[in-house]
Every structure is written in C-alpha cells, then in structure tokens.
Amino acid sequence: MKMMLNMVVAVCLLAVTNAMAVEAGVVLKDEILRKEPFGDAKPSGKLKAGQKVTIEKKDGGWLSVKSGAAKGWVRMLSVRQGSLQKSRNVADSLKSLASGRSGTGHVVATTGIRGLDEEDLKTAKFNASELDKAESYAVSREAAMQFAAQGKLKPRQVEYLPVLQ
Amino acid sequence: MKRFNIFIVLCMIMCGHAWSMDFGAELNKALRENVKKQISDNPGSAANVVSGMFGTSDDEEIAIGRQIAGNLLGASPLVKDDRLQKYVNDVGRWVASQSERPDLPWHFGVLDTADINAFAAPGGYVFVTRGLYMQLKSEAQLAGVLGHEIGHVIRKHHLKILQQSSVIDLGGQALARSVGENDKIKQLIGSGAEVMSRSLDKNAEFEADGIAVVLAARSGYDPFSYVQVLQGLNQIAKDSNSVELLFKTHPLPDARLERLSDVMGDRLDNFKGLTLDKRYYHLRQ
C-alpha cells in the first residue's frame, strides 16, 4: 500500500515536470533515417543535430523515431533519450522516495539525500565483518555458468573495441 | 583460484617423491623469495620495483583490493538482502568469466546508499550502490554496469593510480594474505577508501565503457542495454546530490555516449542479445 502510494506520488511528480519524459529525444548529430534497423537499410529521411524526436520503439541498437513528417530508424547512440530533469528538488525527492531512506542512518543529511562523498570515503574504517559477509556471497565460475544457462545466455566471441586516445 | 592451480601443480610434482612437507609454507616462501629477487634485480627507482611486483603477483593485487573493499564497506555496508547479493554475484561472475581474468576471486556487492555510483577495487572487488541498482531495469543493464567495473579491474586502472602516487616498498609482507588489515598495504592505499574517490584518466573511463558493452555481448546480453544506462544517467539533473561524486570522477554521460558511439560504430550490430528484464531482481522499496 505504501509502495503504491509512493509510486503514485512519483508518477505525479514526473508528470508535472515533463509529460513526455520517456518517449522524447534530441538528435546528437546529423543522421540518416532508415526504413529498417540496419546500417545498410534504405534511407527514409534525414535528421539534423539538435532536432527533437519522438521515440516509438527500440530494436537492438536502433530506435524508431518520428519528427514532423520524418519517420524511420536511427542509431540509439545518435539520440539523447529523455529530457533533463532541470530541478534538483524533483530529482532528489524522487530519489529519496525511491530509496526510502530519508531520515534513516548515516547516508542521509540535511538536503534531500546525501550519499557517499569524498569525506566518507576518506574517513572510512575497515569493516572486517562486512567484508567477510561480502566474500561469503562469492559464486564459482561453474555456478555462474549454470546461472547463465538457466537464463539461456550463450557466450559469444566478440572482439574488444578500438581505444581512441 | 590461480593460487590453487599452482598448488595442485606443485602437489603433482611433489607426488613423485616420498617427501612430507608443508606445501603451503613452501609456496609462500618461494613467492617471497621471488619478490626479493625482483627487488634486487631492479635497483632502479622504488616505483619500478613496485611496478615489477604488480606485474607478477595477483596475490598482492588481491590483498590491496581486499583492504580497499573493507574500507569502502566501512563507509557503506551492504544492502541486507542475501538474494540480491547472491544475484549480483551470479551475474557478475558470469560476465567476468568472459574477460581475460576469469579466475580472479571475483566479488560483487550492492552497497546500502542512495548515492548513484559503482566502484572497482583491484583484484576483483566490485560494488554498485543501491541508488544505481534501483535505476536499472534489466539483467543486461546490470551486466553492463558490472562489465564497466570489471573493465577497470582487468586493465588495473586503480592499481596504476596507486603505483603513480606511491613508491612504497611492500616487500614480502603483503604476500601473506592476512585475515584483517595489513599495515604496509594501509600505507600504500592511504586513508580509508579515498582512492575510490579519485578520478581515473578519462580515457580509462571511456575504455571501461567499451569493455562493458563487449563483455555484455560476449555474455549473451544485449550490449545496448548499457547504452540505456548511460542515457538514464543523462536524465538525472547534473546538480543532484545523488550523482555528485559520480559526475565529479567521471566524464559526463554525454561525452561518454559520444565516445562510445565513435568506437562502437556498427561493430555490435549483429550481437543483439537477451535483456532478461524478467529475471532482474527487484529491490523492495
């Protein structure tokens, strides 16, 4: 019940700030729209950097977008999805709603939430029991393979990407 | 694990002889002598000595990472949820198994803080915060995030920072994997988990992003789910407290997305994989 109420509040807050938060996007660089989600698919239009688009669906690394009369598929990495949450208050109130940690323990301070900052890290003292606990959850390579198989995950050969300097 | 392999090999060699001996102690002694030899073989700067040692000893790297991990857990304990912690270890170990260091004693955990961040300590200690975990929507997204941190470990990014900033001679002491803290290592890593709040070179972050999508793809996951995580970070106000440390120590998501776009091109277009959003372990709020 409490969770549902939190969700309702969160949804309302989101709705107030931007009604189209999930489906909107901004084109990051000039791009060609394609009829299908492939690099060699036929072009169906063009997009300019800065142009606003509506995102309709996703397929792998591709987004199906609409902007005015233009419609087609574009690489996900060429579009910044969503709109920025401008107000830090909204962002923070959402976060503290989501975390449910406001008012408890060491991580919460005066302004909304406060997480791990440099000072916390610097002054941290070795916690042997928590480390033992963390190590107790270790999973063997074999067990991880079983876990992957249960999810029907199959290992694949993929080369590392080039590193630009 | 590797140590265990060495141990087995040693045992096999010894089996031919009728000696009775404490193999563990002998192994330790051998390792210690190896380090001493390296120090005498490298009369140059102390930094070279340290670097030479790091180049050969996983045990030492793990001991350093263990100390940092213990300190980090002093700043923020784990989320008290056994199933969650087991789940991230399952995912993380599977992803790490696709790297060139599959046999490090990998450990993964979720820290109980609303801050949005993730940490990697040398030797295979990887943590995500509860704040970041709750931003994620699928196992593939988690795999990408863990893959980024695994990238820092396998390329020894933090270890290199420690080498640059320290010329302390660890000697043989660090080799003994102590149960608690180790004074020499304490000197090396400095105060608490401060090293975790230092920025890596931004190219190291870009490199880890590239490793994240590749390890996710190798593991059978949708590599573009990680792109979505970066897109999601982009939607959080830059001045939000929850991302203060993350954005201070990392290039902003826009820059990371741009670089990832440059290096990915169409290279992963044929590696659509699973998102496993249904198997994602959702935290109760």
Image: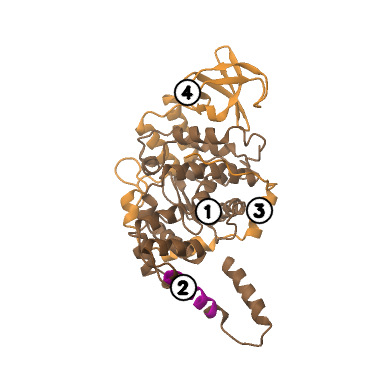
Chain colours: A orange, B brown
Q: Nearer the viewer, mark 2 or mark 4?
A: 2
Residue A48 appears anywhere in the view: yes
Three-letter residue code for mark 2: Lys
Main secondary structure found in the magenta portion: helix
Residue B137's quadrant in the figure?
A: top right
Residue B174 appears anywhere in the view: no
Is B35 colored magenta in this rendering?
Answer: yes
Give the labeled residue for mark 3. Answer: A147
Q: Nearer the viewer, mark 2 or mark 1?
A: 2
Contact between labelled residues 3 and 1, with CB atoms less than 8 Å apart: no
Give the labeled residue for mark 1. Answer: B154
Q: Position of residue A132 (x, y in %)?
A: 48, 65
- Give the mark nearer the N terminus: 4 vs 3: 4
Q: Is residue B120 left or right of residue B188?
A: right
- Give the mark nearer the N terminus: 2 vs 1: 2
Measured Cα–Cα span from mark 1 to mark 3: 22 Å
Q: Nearer the viewer, mark 4 or mark 1?
A: 1
Contact between labelled residues 1 and 4, with CB atoms less than 8 Å apart: no
Contact between labelled residues 3 and 4, with CB atoms less than 8 Å apart: no
- Tell me, yes or no, whether dots 2 and 4 are on the same chain: no
- Seen at 41% across and 39% down, the residue is B251
Three-letter residue code for mark 4: Ala
Q: Which mark is residue A19?
A: 4
